[in-house]
Image (tube, grey):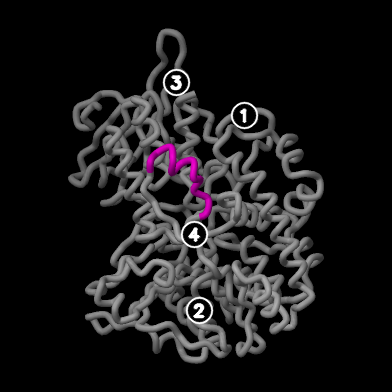
């Protein structure tokens, strides 16, 4: 492969070494293309990394993204990724906010116990509806998920694939309408609705499709909808993608900040001008490299800036809406119910996420207030995979908790990023305390510096650290995973108006989540 310091031209320059950029590089280099990957930070992986967040505390946390659902087995097999995923037995536990001495535990291996748990929270009539609903979702997932590694079906084909009932209920009509019609319990409705609100500031009752699109991506992963724990932490995923890209011959350059892209002209008989990528290194020296194609594994707004144009779309749609909290505990907290904390925290632990609480929090955030009782959800990586703990901490029974807070739009943090972050963190921990039998702060490990091991990241922090505009983990509003007009039908959903420039980050069609689907799609587009 050419040397990035001397080569005047590459087949492909990849902008950004997140997991999608690494996937594109691996596929293309394995096909014999010369590939240069440019990454602005000091390491590859983007949001798909593990890190020792707290100095002197031997724990490697999945700092940003943390679970795997949308990464196809086909990608793992095609690239030979040595990634192990742990399937969680318990789907979720939801304490009843009105009476935390009881809660809904969904056990995927014990149907009778799950039905009894529905009865215990006064939602017995929803148990059968729950199983019918998720059987329907499983059937939907089995049909839709395989299309993510194929050229895009057209709108008519997608409608035929879903069928008229699913098209009406999951695409055309508001998600909240379907959930209200299916379930009676406010608590059960909330558990279902959260899949439509992860990182998405939306009202499920609205007909803008935002919650619907988010919901679809969160329930189709792997054709089952399961969210699995990456053994060793999320860094194993990006680490494996880096390994196969390097072994295939791709050049990976970190601390290389891309400052401009000239898209060149369309390739035609006799040539056509190549694209040009300008970047600076740590010393401030400017470099320029030509490429037959540029794969932009970055946000669409970032690509717009690099091309020298104003970002497209509604600026508000770029805003992220989550608070990510990482914690290290010396023990799991006690619950008010008789459910074992090791079962409750092994799946998704829902905190004040009834349908009515979600609506209240949305309304408060929409007028510029941090929700008084923030809805959030938690999972414990170490119950499924203790390898991220150092041996001494593992022996001492320490654990990690990851909290993902909903309805925390970037606008809440713009004026006072540090103050708002601390206020949001305090409110979120208080919200958790409301359903525990002891304060979560009493369970936090204390680092060598005397500080508790808890870290919060707002959308403003994510924007600064990962170059995600607005801290939006999906880079922009999610799009349906099929072509919405005939011009895009049978393409890979990565084209831009510039024939030599492809979009391969989470903002591409079928982007979002740890999937590598856009990165693979960009490679398929170039490889024909």
- Of residue 284 and residue 38, the one placed in the foreground of this image is 38
| Residue behind mark 1 | 490
Image check: 80 left or right of 135?
left
Tell me what residue is drawn at x 26 percent, y 41 percent: 253
Question: Are the residues flagged by discs 2 and 3 in contact, CB closer than 8 Å?
Answer: no
Q: Nearer the viewer, mark 1 or mark 4?
A: 4
Indicate whether 168 appears above or below 527.
below
Please give the range of residues in magenta: 69-80
Q: Earlier in the sequence, mark 2 or mark 3?
A: 3
Whichever of callouts 1 and 3 sits on the residue coming sooner in the sequence is 3
Q: Does residue 78 appear in the picture of this structure?
A: yes
Question: In this figure, which residue is indicated by the disc labeled 3?
Answer: 265
> Does residue 128 lie above or below 306 as drawn?
below
Residue 79 part of the magenta-drawn span:
yes
Give residue 366's position: percent from left, percent from top: 63, 68
Q: CA distance from mark 1 to mark 4?
A: 30 Å
Q: Earlier in the sequence, mark 1 or mark 2?
A: 2
* Local crowd size for mark 1, using a 10 Å CA cut-off: few (<14), some (14–19), many (≥20): some
Q: Which residue is mark 4?
A: 228
- In which quadrant is the N terminus drawn? top left
Q: Which residue is mark 2?
A: 428
Q: Nearer the viewer, residue 307 or 389?
A: 389
Real-space CA distance between mark 2 and mark 3, rounded to the nearest whole angstrom: 51 Å
């Amino acid at each position: 492969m050419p040397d990035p310091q001397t080569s005047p031209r590459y087949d492909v320059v990849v902008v950004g070494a997140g997991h999608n950029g690494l996937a594109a590089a691996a596929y293309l280099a394995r096909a014999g293309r010369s590939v240069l990957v440019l990454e602005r930070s000091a390491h590859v992986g983007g949001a798909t990394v593990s890190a020792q967040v707290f100095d002197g505390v031997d724990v490697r946390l999945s700092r940003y993204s943390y679970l795997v659902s949308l990464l196809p087995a086909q990608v793992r097999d095609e690239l030979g990724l040595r990634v192990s995923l742990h399937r969680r037995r318990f789907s979720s536990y939801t304490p009843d906010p009105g009476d935390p001495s009881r809660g809904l535990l969904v056990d995927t291996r014990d149907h009778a116990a799950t039905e009894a748990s529905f009865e215990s929270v006064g939602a017995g009539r929803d148990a059968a509806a729950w199983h019918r609903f998720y059987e329907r979702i499983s059937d939907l997932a089995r049909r839709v998920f395989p299309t993510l590694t194929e050229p895009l079906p057209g709108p008519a084909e997608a409608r035929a694939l879903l069928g008229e009932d699913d098209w009406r209920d999951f695409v055309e009509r508001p998600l909240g309408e379907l959930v209200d019609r299916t379930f009676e319990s406010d608590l059960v409705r909330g558990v279902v609705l959260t899949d439509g609100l992860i990182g998405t500031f939306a009202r499920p009752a609205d007909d803008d499709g935002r919650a619907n699109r988010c919901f679809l991506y969160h329930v189709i992963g792997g054709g089952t909808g399961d969210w699995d724990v990456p053994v060793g932490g999320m860094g194993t995923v990006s680490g494996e993608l880096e390994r196969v890209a390097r072994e295939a011959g791709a050049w990976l350059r970190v601390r290389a900040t891309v400052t401009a892209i000239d898209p060149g002209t369309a390739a035609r008989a006799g040539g056509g001008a190549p694209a040009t990528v300008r970047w600076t290194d740590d010393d401030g020296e400017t470099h320029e490299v030509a490429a037959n194609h540029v794969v932009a594994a970055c946000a669409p707004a970032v690509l717009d800036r690099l091309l020298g144009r104003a970002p497209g779309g509604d600026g508000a749609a770029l805003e992220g809406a989550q608070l990510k909290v990482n914690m290290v505990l010396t023990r799991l907290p006690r619950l008010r119910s008789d459910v074992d904390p090791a079962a409750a925290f092994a799946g998704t632990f829902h905190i004040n996420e009834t349908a009515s609480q979600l609506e209240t929090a949305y309304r408060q955030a929409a007028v510029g207030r941090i929700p008084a009782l923030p809805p959030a959800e938690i999972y414990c990586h170490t119950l499924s995979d203790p390898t991220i703990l150092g041996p001494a901490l593992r022996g001492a029974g320490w654990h990690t908790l990851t909290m993902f807070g909903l309805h925390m739009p970037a606008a809440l943090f713009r004026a006072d990023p540090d103050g708002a972050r601390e206020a949001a963190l305090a409110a979120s921990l208080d919200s958790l305390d409301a359903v525990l039998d002891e304060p979560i702060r009493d369970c936090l490990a204390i680092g060598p510096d005397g500080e508790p091991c808890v870290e919060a990241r707002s959308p403003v922090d994510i924007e600064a650290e990962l170059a995600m505009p607005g801290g939006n983990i999906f880079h922009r509003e999610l799009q349906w995973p099929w072509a919405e007009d005939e011009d895009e039908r049978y393409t890979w959903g990565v084209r831009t108006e510039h024939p030599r420039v492809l979009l391969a980050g989470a903002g591409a069609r079928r982007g979002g989540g740890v999937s590598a689907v856009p990165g693979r799609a960009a490679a398929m587009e170039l490889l024909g």
